[in-house]
């Protein structure tokens, strides 16, 4: 835990320092990408291949910048209270097409007897869910299943879990996943999980991981409950009518 806290501390320092630079670079990159588009139209086939490489690398830089910026965005927006399963359902809807393309099924399993609200920045929460979904999809083979669940934990907390049947991780990898810039992907940024961890901590929660190579991975977001809304109970009398 201490190690993870230190990571997120260093992350916000890095984030603040880089925010203004990242912003300038992003603007510059947008204009460079505009010109590569033009080049593709006006150049011969061989050179067009090189321009494609430039373009895709620029795309990678752009997403790195975007993630960097969302990490370091000053959180002067007010916290809001929002319903957790609605928020997760929105994200499931967004991720479904990407899962379908990869022939991966998504199941959402809400194991609560009442609606739960949490307090924080809903937009960041969604970004965090998207990051965990993306990682799970990227680690998974076709015809596997990805389960996201909301589970009771104790009186004050719930767990949002993301379980995949993907590649899994070695102990060595697990030790590094929350470190900024740790990635095993060709086009990875290594900023997804640090962002998720920071989001969880900013809400008074935490992020845990369990993983086994070749079996799959389960990320658990522990979140403090802000309030519980009683669900409408089915009318008992109505159920008794044959
Ligand atoms: P990125 O996705 O850009 O690599 P992340 O911070 O999101 O950065 O993830 C860091 C690394 O953690 C990944 O490169 C991968 O090695 C590992 N990882 C994250 N999620 C999973 C998962 N569900 N299954 C297997 N490995 C994972
Ligand atoms: Mg990621």
Image (tube, rainbow, N blue to C red):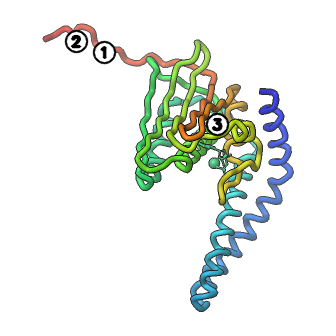
Q: Disc 2 designates what residue? A: 239
Instruction: Give the class, few, some or many, for how many residues have Cα within 10 Å of label 1's Cα (few <14, many ≥20).
Output: few
Please state the horizontal and vertical placement of residue 116, each as a whole percent of the image. 52, 23
Dots 1, 2 in contact, CB < 8 A: yes
Please state the horizontal and vertical placement of residue 27, each as a whole percent of the image. 73, 67
In the image, is 229 to the left or to the right of 211? left
Instruction: Determine whether 14 is above or below 224 in the image.
Output: below
Dots 2, 3 in contact, CB < 8 A: no
| Element assignment for label 3 | loop
Q: Disc 1 designates what residue? A: 234
Disc on the earlier residue, 3 or 1: 3
| Element assignment for label 2 | helix
In the picture, which quadrant includes the N terminus?
top right
Please state the horizontal and vertical placement of residue 152, each as a whole percent of the image. 53, 19
The circle drawn on residue 58 is: none
| Element assignment for label 1 | loop
Disc on the earlier residue, 1 or 2: 1
């Amino acid at each position: 835990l201490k190690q993870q806290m230190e990571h997120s501390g260093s992350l916000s320092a890095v984030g603040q320092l880089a925010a203004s630079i990242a912003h300038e670079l992003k603007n510059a990159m947008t204009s460079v990408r505009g010109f590569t588009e033009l080049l593709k139209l006006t150049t011969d086939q061989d050179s067009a291949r090189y321009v494609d490489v430039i373009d895709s690398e620029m795309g990678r830089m752009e997403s790195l910048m975007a993630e960097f910026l969302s990490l370091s965005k000053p959180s002067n927006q007010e916290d809001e209270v929002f319903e957790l399963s609605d928020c997760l359902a929105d994200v499931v809807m967004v991720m479904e097409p990407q899962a379908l393309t990869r022939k991966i099924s998504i199941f959402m399993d809400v194991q609560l007897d009442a609606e739960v609200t949490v307090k924080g920045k809903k937009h960041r929460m969604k970004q965090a869910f998207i990051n965990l979904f993306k990682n799970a999809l990227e680690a998974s083979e076709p015809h596997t299943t990805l389960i996201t669940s909301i589970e009771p934990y104790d009186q004050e907390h719930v767990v949002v879990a993301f379980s995949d049947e993907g590649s899994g991780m070695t102990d060595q990898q697990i030790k590094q996943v929350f470190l900024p810039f740790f990635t095993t992907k060709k086009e990875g940024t290594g900023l997804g999980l640090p962002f998720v961890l920071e989001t969880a901590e900013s809400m008074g929660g935490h992020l845990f991981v369990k993983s086994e190579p070749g079996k799959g991975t389960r990320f658990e977001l522990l979140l403090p409950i802000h309030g519980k809304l009683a669900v409408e109970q089915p009318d008992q009398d109505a159920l008794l009518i044959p």
